Amino acid sequence: MAFEGLSDKLQNVFKKLRGKGALTEKDIKTAMREVKLALLEADVNFKVVKDFINKVTERAIGQEVMGSLTPGQQVIKIVNEEMIALMGGDDKNQLNYSDKGFTVMMLVGLQGAGKTTMAAKLAGLMKKDNKRPMLVACDVYRPAAVKQLQVVGGQVGVPVFEMGTDVDPVEIAKNGIEQARKQDCNVVIIDTAGRLHVDEALMEELKNIKEATQPTEILLVVDAMTGQDAVNVSSNFDEWLDITGVILTKLDGDTRGGAALSIRSVTGKPVKFSGVGEKLTDIEAFHPDRMASRILGMGDVLSLIEKATQAIDEEKAAEVSARMMSNNFGLDDLLESMQQIKKMGNMNDLMGMIPGMSGKMKDVEVDEKALGRTEAIIRSMTPQERRNPDILNSSRKRRIIKGAGVTIQELNQLLKQYEQSKSMMKQFSGVMKGKRRGGLAGLFGGKNPFAGL
């Protein structure tokens, strides 16, 4: 999970601060030394770290903290605010579209950063926003680059314009724009060539494409796992092309976080999106406040809600909820709930977005295969058995485990968890129905647990 090492170190620093009733200037300076080391180990630019620590220290040794009733929490608040500012603060991370109704965007970057896949991810995102994008294949050097763009473009249902690999990329870009207008597309995403390193020939070609197409956005795609190198690459591309924003890929991998924390400060350009997985739907708008919250172990509820909104069918969820509350919750409903949750993404990443859970999930790996086995068990049951698992006798159970390829222990464990869920739902339903009888009193023997407080 991204930022895991940095997050752990920072949380350990803050744990020490929370344990103190009052803070001295020495306490703050000791804590800031540890924060500085954590950031440097995360491959954050040295100058960025120095400025960050100076700002936090200056604020922390003032009246803002020393006069506070909860000085430890106040320091954490300052670190959070400065980290948000470091990554862009109130940056507008949304894409800019031309007010003329036709927008051209260039994706640039080094080879291997993930430009081609990101082009399709962006196009898919635009389709959801009722845009009509076209992808244009201008990488004529990398073997199979054109074919790759055609494949991923087809997967997201977006047209791809190409002229093979023997045509000047500038001509391909210009012809692609003409074709997009003819096909009534209103956004063109140009997938440009990359190199293993920045060179003058690459930059001249990109400058020529820029001059010929006049793009509204020039988005630099960088691999977050390259750390400090990503920052240097960003600076070079910005000098040549005056980029409008950055997209970080592989932010779900074992990245130390240095690129995400340094790029905005070094280039002055906002990080607009991040790639958080291999699927073509694994793309998120980059929000500095939410990213800071994740890094500091505070969770990211807003992103979790957004993922749920995109993945979960509201009507089906409402139906399942109604059956839960009426105590008619069957194994079909459990299967439906599991499938909708799986659509939201990696379970460990989702758990890390819940406040207070990131540290607890550090040594816990959610077994995605176990969810598959649970699904196999339920699908091996008859509709009657799913509605009423109480009818499961020995022969029925033998048939189910044979069909699902699981053990009797796994089946019994699922049935036990199901019964516990039903019991909890029954209690909760009783509380909701008993609001008129004193709210939570139903769970506490008819007594209000908060009376007299």
Image: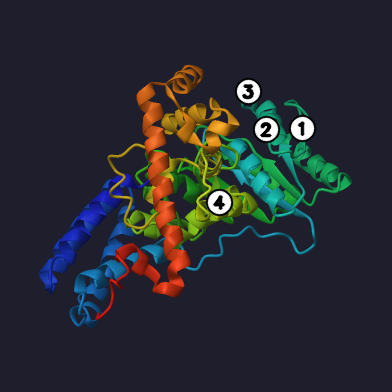
Amino acid at the residue labelled 2: Leu
> Mark 3 against mark 4, which lies toward the viewer?
4
Between residues 204 and 16, which one lies in front from this camera angle? Answer: 16
Q: Earlier in the sequence, mark 2 or mark 3?
A: 3
Amino acid at the residue labelled 3: Pro
- Number of residues whose C-alpha sits closer than 10 Å to that of mark 4, classed few (under 14), some (14–19) or many (20 or more): some
Label 4 vs label 1: CA separation?
52 Å
Label 1 vs label 2: CA separation?
9 Å
Tell me, for residue 323, which label it has, or none.
Answer: 4
Q: Quadrant of the N terminus?
A: top left
Provide the residue designation for mark 1: 162
Task: Label 3: state its secondary structure.
Answer: loop
The percent position of residue 207, horizontal first and vertical second, equals 65, 46
Amino acid at the residue labelled 4: Arg
Provide the residue designation for mark 3: 143
Amino acid at the residue labelled 1: Glu
